[in-house]
Amino acid sequence: MPDSVSTPARIRNIAELARLAGVSTGTVSRALANKSLVNKDTRERIQALARAHGFRPNQMARRLRVQETRVIGVVVPLGHEQRQHLSDPFFMAILGHLADTLTENGYDIMLSRVIPDADDWLERIVDSGMLDGVLLMGQSNQFETIERVAQWYRPMVVWGSHRPGQTHCTVGVDNRQGGRLAGKCLIKAGRTRLAFLGEAVAPELKDRFDGLCDAAAAAGLPAPIKLDTHLASDVMAEDIAAHIKRIHAKVDGISAASDLIAMHAVRALADCGIRVPQDISITGFDDLPLAEQTIPRLTTISQSIAVGARAMVQALFERIAGNDSASLEMEPKLIRRDTA
Amino acid sequence: MPDSVSTPARIRNIAELARLAGVSTGTVSRALANKSLVNKDTRERIQALARAHGFRPNQMARRLRVQETRVIGVVVPLGHEQRQHLSDPFFMAILGHLADTLTENGYDIMLSRVIPDADDWLERIVDSGMLDGVLLMGQSNQFETIERVAQWYRPMVVWGSHRPGQTHCTVGVDNRQGGRLAGKCLIKAGRTRLAFLGEAVAPELKDRFDGLCDAAAAAGLPAPIKLDTHLASDVMAEDIAAHIKRIHAKVDGISAASDLIAMHAVRALADCGIRVPQDISITGFDDLPLAEQTIPRLTTISQSIAVGARAMVQALFERIAGNDSASLEMEPKLIRRDTA
DNA sequence: ACAGATTGCTCAATCGATTGCAGCATCCCT
DNA sequence: AGGGATGCTGCAATCGATTGAGCAATCTGT
């Protein structure tokens, strides 16, 4: 146990410690960094002294000097839906994995939830001088801004869709293909009157909707209805309930934009006395751990969040090291459970 | 749109900008801070120049100089359960609220998930010089460490239980009382053979168990069984399923340590063909948004996470300002829904 | 015993901003 | 016109560490 309590005078900086040890600050710095340039004896003496006084060098100063912060910014842009909470389960799940991987590699995480009001929000983050790199959790409606910054700022990786010719590096699932899978699954279950439940402003979600349309068209079905839903967790529930009440008689298959939305929909249908999947089939999207625990279990499209998170970090490290890294588009997978 | 793209030479520091503007660095600094000390014309000229070159002062340097970082550390200690994920929904829910409140006040969040191996983990965080304050998300099994640091480090607020005589400032719910409420609710539903599902190592959870025991004792019932469960999300499900399989015949009321656990339990019971609440009653704990969306809806103990998060931040700001702030113990509330 | 290599440390510049103090104009008032 | 107040800007110290260059002492080999 460090006896930092027993010693009265706290040491504030390397200079004080140097005076105490009777050496120069340079030596102290090297000693604490365990550099072999300083004699083993002095080195250990200084380290012991530091420990005894509970001294740890100021990271801010070190980072300013070294020009490396070991901090990665994890940024959530909330462009189209300002009321969306950080507590969105999908985001949280991926954040958990990011945190694991990054801390394993000795990086800290700076979390920012940004409402892109001023158009230089990303520039502000990126050259605050506080970050070695940036992970952007979704493109929201900020595609152009991201592209603009990506022109000159390399260490940035974005969760989202890849558009041909874009500069910024993305990791994500093939959302359109995912939408198609969901559609096929519903159609295979004999459903013909489909609806998409979610908000199609962000590119990711729009792609899912388009995929669903693909599937419907391929089967010769009419185009699915699009039901817009707020993504803010506090209003989402009632929003969805209202939709369900209004349309449940006209629809027999629902493709939800996320597991959370699907879960709310199942709940709302139950309230209307409609059985899932007997009366209406539902698919989710994401395959959160949660999806397996609901009653009935969600049939959903898997995004393999853990793999994605690891890939983002990997790509970011490449870029920090100065190498290039291509976008990654993962294959979505249909996970058949009980709702479709 | 900033034309940072069109200008070839990026400006790296205040000195270059000063040379460009034909003034001294001091003036530039004051101008960018919008201080009235510098002439309105020069001020605007410099600001325009900065904007044109997409220049923003280095935050690291500023913070070193000003000795104020505007960064709050949000730390999750994983002492007793190293495999517990950051993605725990309760933690995520509260983090969301913390992020909202802190960003509203112009603070950034540094997220650390710590496995307390070395016993100076908290000291390392606290005097890294990177943080204006620390929010600790739960006491885990690190009570002594937290106390030790709280002796000399003021701006720290902890989510968890308050023990008489402790130094560190906590915000949390009266867990024991919550446990009692859950017990009473089960007993009122006619349940006599109770069990506690969760891990009673962390003080918070132990209190909930003790409260349950209080209620049982008060009703003249035998002491509830304690079923230990891993809190890691990946094994929790099977862990719980195994418990349920083993004991469902001997038990008719389950008080779960969290909503997530309760949800898994309901799921596992359904797999065994046992109906909730007809055959077994279950209560959760936390009242996550999720609890209202499951089928059946969870009866649970409310922690009012939003209020708690706000209180933590409030207390922290007081402490950063140099004032004192007392611990807050909130009243738990029983939310009756469908599972008990 | 002496050149040359090695070891162990100090000195001072540096990272990029902020800010107290001093100094120079300008302006106002009598 | 002279004295004082006021407004604006520059100078240089400062935050707390890192690190290359330089120097003295010791060691190695002949």
Image (cartoon, coloured by chain):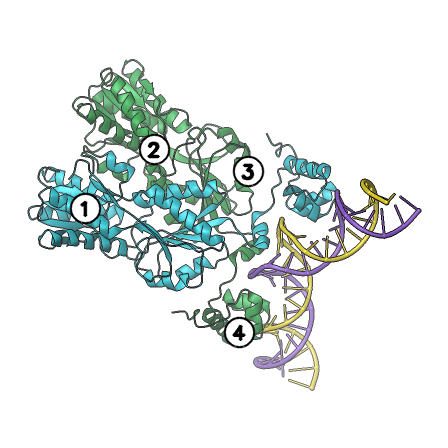
Chain colours: A cyan, B green, C purple, D yellow
Task: Judge by depth and name the residue closer to the eye, B255 or B324.
Answer: B255
Between the C-alphas of marks 2 and 3, the distance is 29 Å
Judged from the image, the secondary structure of the residue bearing numbered disc 2 is helix
Sort mark 3 into few (<14), some (14-19) or many (20+) by Cα contacts within 10 Å: many
The amino acid marked with disc number 1 is Ala
How far apart are the two marked residues, 3 and 1, measured between alpha carbons? 50 Å
Residue B340 is tagged as none
Q: Amino acid at mark 4?
A: Asn
Disc 1, SS: helix
Distance between the alpha carbons at the discs numbered 3 and 4: 45 Å
- CB under 8 Å between callouts 2 and 3? no
**Which residue bears the numbered disc 4?**
B39
Q: Are marks 4 and 1 on the same chain?
A: no
The location of residue A117, given as percent across then percent down, is 35, 61
Q: Is residue B87 visible?
A: yes
Q: To which residue does mark 2 refer?
A: B233
Name the one closer to the observer, A228 or A191. Answer: A191
Residue closer to the observer: B293 or B156: B293
Q: Which mark is first along the chain, 3 or 2?
A: 3
Q: Whole-Å distance between the Cαs marked 1 and 2? A: 26 Å
Q: Which residue is mark 3?
A: B123
Q: Do the residues marked 2 and 3 share a common chain?
A: yes
Name which quarter of the figure residue B62 lies in: bottom right
Q: Give the residue number, with chain letter if any, for mark 1.
A: A182
Q: Position of residue B64 (x, y in %)?
A: 57, 54
Marks 3 and 4 in Cβ contact (< 8 Å): no
